[in-house]
Image (cartoon, rainbow, N blue to C red):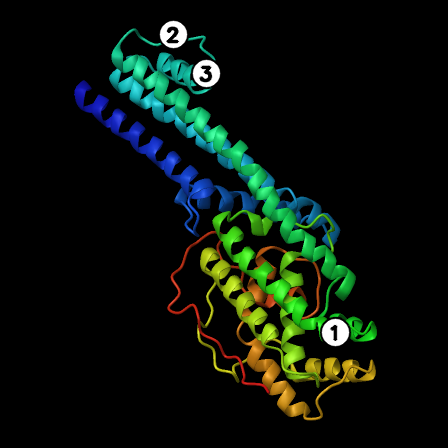
Amino acid sequence: MGTVVDVVLVLAGVTLVCIVLDSAMRTFVLPRAVVSRLTRIVFRSLRVLFDAIARRFKTYEGRDRVMALYAPFGLLLLVVSWLVILIAAYAFVLRGAVVHDWARAFELSGSSLFTLGFVVPPRTAAGYALSFAESASGLAVLALLIAYLPTIYSSFSRRELLVAKLAVRAGTPPTAVELLERFHAIGWTDQLPELWSTWEEWFAELAETHTTFAVLPFFRSPNPNRSWITAAGAVLDGAALANSALSIPWSPEAGLCIRAGYLALRELADLFGIPYDPDPAPDGPISISRDEFDDAYRRLGGAGVPIRPDRERAWRDFAGWRVNYDSVLLALAGLTMAPYAPWSSDRSLRVRRPPILRVRTATSRGGSAAPRAG
């Protein structure tokens, strides 16, 4: 009986070690949107706690201060979870293969993991091998965190640079209408294609970094009234309005920006289990009402921005662009608890919040309902 129990303990310990190493590799090393079950459990459980704390605050500023700690604390808790599981895992293996006392097994495991050296392993090949392996495991986990924190914060800084620049061009919170008004007021309408190209690159990097490091979407902007998702919404709506409502030369850069944007948001939707229609119809429903579009149309015209005389055609074209990213934009705004911004987070509560970090497989990832606006 003792032999069977020892074998079970060794197998259980080896399995736990593999789970930890798999989680660490998927979280920090594997360059694609794959999330381990352990990571999901940690972040889902922590989100329940942070949501409960945030609900105690009546103002957005209070909730923002709470949620600003969610992603950093989640990373810390994930590493602590890895270390705790490694201690238990190697204690199981030591108890089953080397020592026959639980206290001794845990003492030796903890000493080896943190390379403290206050407990000498049994002078056997198995004892030395397990002690060396556990020390290497602990160092590897901590080294991964230390090595990849600069990478994570570098991606965060590059993301926030354009978000901050957008506040200058589109206000805080950013709006598509104010973006187009300001570019017209300073005579930069002919530079809009350059803006769309810049944000196309931003969306491409967003898709790469925020799916590789799934915690990045929850890192909040230094300014509580700014957010990467509301900035994305303002730029996408600005490009959609430019190609549908403005009487300026049709811009392929705007169309490419919108396509890069909705593909990036859909990749994040896949990561977080957010459902969406991969190939929506151009006349599909969107969250923007016709009255809201008409108000934006009149405001642009009142500011002297050249607009198309055919408002009905402009509305159809705008809706045809917006339908590609409407639902995922709102869902991500709700998931990240984004600050107020028109046409995005102001209506995100209507969308059911999806589970955190649940990978889904999209049936199609390249569909577009973009109108052929001339």
Question: Is 16 placed left or right of 274 in the picture?
Answer: left
Which residue is found at the position 36% from the left and 36% from the top?
19
Compared to 333, does 155 lie above or below? above
Q: Residues within 10 Å of mark 3 (few under 14, many from 20)?
A: some
Compared to 56, does 105 lie above or below? above
> Can residue 53 be seen here?
yes
| Rendering quarter of residue 3 | top left
State the residue position of label 1: 180
Which residue is found at the position 79% from the left and 71% from the top?
182
Question: Label 2 is placed on what type of residue?
Answer: Val
State the residue position of label 2: 120
Question: Label 1 is placed on what type of residue?
Answer: Leu
- Taking depth in this image into account, of 146 and 221 the one nearest to the observer is 146
Q: Residues within 10 Å of mark 2 (few under 14, many from 20)?
A: few
- Taking depth in this image into account, of 193 and 24 the one nearest to the observer is 193
Mark drawn on residue 115? 3
| Rendering quarter of residue 102 | top left
